[in-house]
Amino acid sequence: MKNTFAFLFLTMMFPVTALAQNGNAISAAQKSFRDGQFRKSAVQFYNLAFTEKNLKPQEKSAARYYLGLSLMKLKMNQAAAFPLIITTRESSGTLAQKALQNLVVVSDRLNDTGLLDYTIRKVDPNNLGEVARDLYLNRLAQAQMNKGELDPALENLAAALRLQPHNEESLYLQGLIHLKKNQAEPAIASLSTLLDRYQSRPATDPKRGLASIALARAHYQGKNFKEAIDLYREIPKDHPAYRDSQIELTWSLFRSAQFRSAMSTIQTLHTPYYENFYDPESLILRAIILLFVCQNDEADKSLQNFTRNYTQAYSQIAQYNKAARTAESNYKQIDAARRHLNIIKKGAAGNYSGEIPFFVVRTLMDRGALKNKITYLKEIEEEIKRAESLRQPSEKGLRTYIQKILLKRQANAQREAGQLLANSLRATEEELSVLSGDLNLLRYEVLNGKKKQARSEYIKKINNGEAHSRIDHDNSRNFYISNGNRYWPFEGEYWRDEIGNYQYLGVNTCETE
């Protein structure tokens, strides 16, 4: 969704006359940059910008600007932002505008909301090129959407689409904002246009999958359940959105009264592959569906499973939330979960050291703002590794400069991630509190259903002249085995793309009473 190559090419055309008056060092740095020797040019421009004492202020600003460009080329975008920011503060005119244009690109690459806010305040979109202006409008709209300013966001997206009518990111954001406004029809229009552009791509393409699930949500919101069902079923098993698509597909099938299909789908979420995910809603939904087909004993088992899995987790989360926690201590829970996840991905058992259940933290880490912040942290960690590779004696000053920037940004991002986790845990505690209330109501309905079922069986036996010493003598597990789930298993470990297929065979006992 990002098209920055042409824009970056244009930034290379910035005139270097500001650096043309200071001899061999400057000429050598310029030549290294033009020749694509960005590691060398980064060292040279760093020395000119921060250690050379004979440069004029305007020449130092130009050196900082080119240091930023060199670091961008070295995929050190976070480090590149700082000399570019200094350039915008200390210079004016064309140089400052070029630095701001590159900050738009950097904030887009990093998805750094703080840098984005800074750039939005500083940049004049009228001074941007067409590609950069389109990128700027998308970033501005996204920031407004996150703040709840939906109408201004739509206006900026409309302006972006006038520049590039088929811009994929603009269409996607436009669809999401219409969904937030509960405007299903315009959301369907935007997302349908987007998905049409992806039809030539394979089903496993990540962007096609995201477009499919977004369009499915729009159809669900518009109560077009058939269309939503078809789109949810297009999400492949190895797509990151597959797990979310299954619970949403189940709701679509349930809302369209396809109870057997709904049970077949939700069974996927209760396979061993997904047992370490926080997903209480699926157990509650399973119990509701079973109640609708009067499978009261099976509904009771689902509620017992909820109690077994989430009652203790609810208690741990509530206890954790009561204690006074710093953002740093909250981040330790994220760090423990990340390390444990890396261990189990390698096939080892490992010891989880977190205070919050692992399956809760790993799921929260994959949601919303916390997911974005962790992705941002991964970018910083990768940049730290790249900075470590600067081991030549001549690179020591540049390496120290970059490390100082990155370690400070890493600490700030970790604190922000810790605060986001704290917010998510409070929301999770509230969610489990609400679901616990639903659980009590469902238990009452299950008990009431069992009473009605027992009464019905009793009356049948009386009418048939049968003894009623054991009213439920036919209520054996063999019945549910033969009429429960038909399952096509697989051989081997539980990889995501090897999850078996389920077909629910249980009968609707409401129709047999």
Image: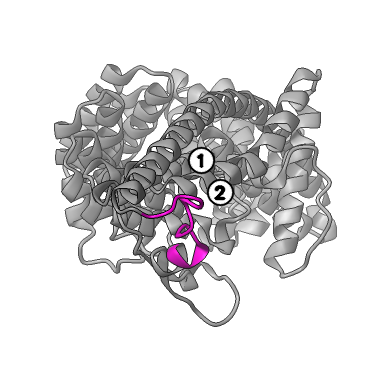
Residue at image mark 2:
72
What segment is highlighted magenta in the picture?
Answer: 466-479
Q: Is 80 rendered above or below residue 92?
A: below
Q: Earlier in the sequence, mark 2 or mark 1?
A: 2
Count of numbered badges drawn on the protein: 2
- Residue 498 position, x and y percent, is 48, 73
Q: Which mark is residue 106?
A: 1
Q: Is 38 rendered above or below residue 215?
A: below
- Residue 423 position, x and y percent, is 62, 24
Q: What amino acid does circle 1 point to? A: Val
The dominant secondary structure in magenta is: loop
Q: Residue at x 43, y 19 (%)?
A: 147
Q: Residues within 10 Å of mark 1 (few under 14, many from 20)?
A: many
Between 136 and 342, the residue placed more toward the observer is 342
Residue 91 covered by magenta stretch: no
Q: What amino acid does circle 2 point to? A: Met
Image side of residue 459 versus residue 158, left or right: right
Q: Of the residues tagged 2 and 1, which is closer to the observer?
A: 1
Q: Is 455 rendered above or below residue 228?
A: above
Q: Residue at x 48, y 77 (%)?
A: 489
Circle 1 — which element? helix
Q: Quadrant of residue 493?
A: bottom right
Image side of residue 134 versus residue 28, left or right: left
Please indicate, yes or no, whether residue 78 appears anywhere in the rendered image.
Answer: no
Q: Mark 2–mark 1 contact, CB under 8 Å?
A: yes
